[in-house]
Amino acid sequence: TELKRIIAPTEKTVTFADVGGLSEVKKQIHKKIILPYQKPSLFQRFRKRVGGGILLYGPPGCGKTLLARATAGECQAKFFNIELADILDMYIGESEKRLHTVFEQARNQSPAVIFFDEVEAIGGKRQYSRESTSSKLVSQFLSELDGFAQNNHGVLVLASTNVPWAIDSAFLRPGRFDRLIFIPPPDQTARENILNILLKDRPIERNLDLASLAKITSGFSGADLQNVVETAIDNAIEDSISSQEDVLLSQQHLQQAMKEVKATTIDW
Ligand code: ATP
């Protein structure tokens, strides 16, 4: 059952519409990843090489995981979100077995997207990777990837890292994580877009000025903005209780919450 928890595909489907900003990245993913995946014979006809994994890198909380999940959603593929920590913290021999099971399950349930968060835990240069990472595990991971490079079996491999400079070059070779995509912190337009997504289906006041909120949140990641919205909602709920009325989420709630949340992408 422990193993089941690690490799169970995630149920909730999200698509690119749920990801704010990143329009260039979405286009690139569509062209380079989704199309070859959906139309392999077309690419074959032009002798265009496909396959290999994609490494998403950038500051924390800016949508790497969300984008990976949405890529699966766009392909109507199952999404396997693999916490490497869960795999690495196993007895010797057990982690190899689990890693193999992950790839095997994905193949059996294809189309599938496997996502490895914080891949430096296994693919990092010595000082960044986990102590528990044996060289046997690393070479197994690489050979599983190489297997997909020959024939992707309807499985797409994505990974993410906040420390791209830490990734061992063996992981970046052709057929492995040979495509790197930078996921930047959201700019003003993207922040407004993200706020709109986060506030969708919530009881909000009409005429909220999200543009001005986007303007004053430079340095905020998507996760920081989510934090702002959640805090604002907590306050609106509190107001509803104390006033015994159906309070709507207001500009004031958001403005106040913004002061309580710190921007985290500043030093990346
Ligand atoms: P980490 O490097 O810490 O794993 P990450 O880049 O994978 O971070 P996510 O897990 O994708 O970040 O983002 C965390 C949450 O922040 C998301 O679940 C989502 O609610 C919100 N979020 C972040 N970026 C965006 C975005 N571009 N559009 C909409 N929501 C976003």
Image (cartoon, helix red, strand yellow):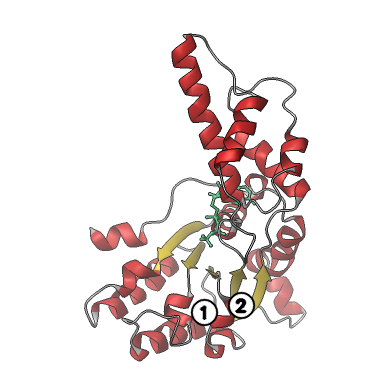
- Neighbor class of circle 1 (other Cα within 10 Å; few <14, some 14-19, many 20+) is many
Q: In this view, does 250 lie above or below 36?
A: above
Identify which residue is drawn at 35% across, 75% down.
99
Disc on the earlier residue, 1 or 2? 2
Number of marks drawn = 2
Q: Which part of the image, by quadrant, shows the N terminus?
A: bottom left
x and y percentages locating residue 218 in the rendered image: 71, 50
Residue 51 — which label?
2
SS label for mark 1: helix
- Quadrant in the picture for the C terminus: bottom right
Mark 1 → mark 2, Cα distance in angstroms: 7 Å
Q: Residue 266 carries which label?
A: none
- In this orientation, which residue lies closer to the viewer: 48 or 233? 233
Residue type pointed to by label 1: Phe
Q: Residue at x 33, y 71 (%)?
A: 87
Verify CB contact (< 8 Å) between mark 1 and mark 2.
yes
| Above or below, comparing residue 66 to residue 252 in the picture | below
* Nearest to the observer: residue 86 or residue 268: 268
In this picture, residue 53 sits left or right of residue 85: right
Instruction: Name the kind of residue labelled 2 in the image.
Output: Gly
Circle 2 sits in a helix, a strand or a loop, which is it? loop
Q: Does the residue labelled 2 lie within 8 Å of ligand 1?
A: no
Q: In the rendered view, would you say 139 is above or below 69?
A: below
Q: Position of residue 23 (x, y in %)?
A: 75, 55
Tell me which corner region of the image, top left, top right, bottom left or bottom right, holds residue 48: bottom right
Front-lying residue, 41 or 76: 76
The residue indicated by pointer 1 is 148
Task: Indicate yes or no: mark 1 CB to ligand 1 under 8 Å.
Answer: no
Q: In this view, does 117 lie to the left or right of 27?
A: left
Residue 220 in view (yes/no)? yes
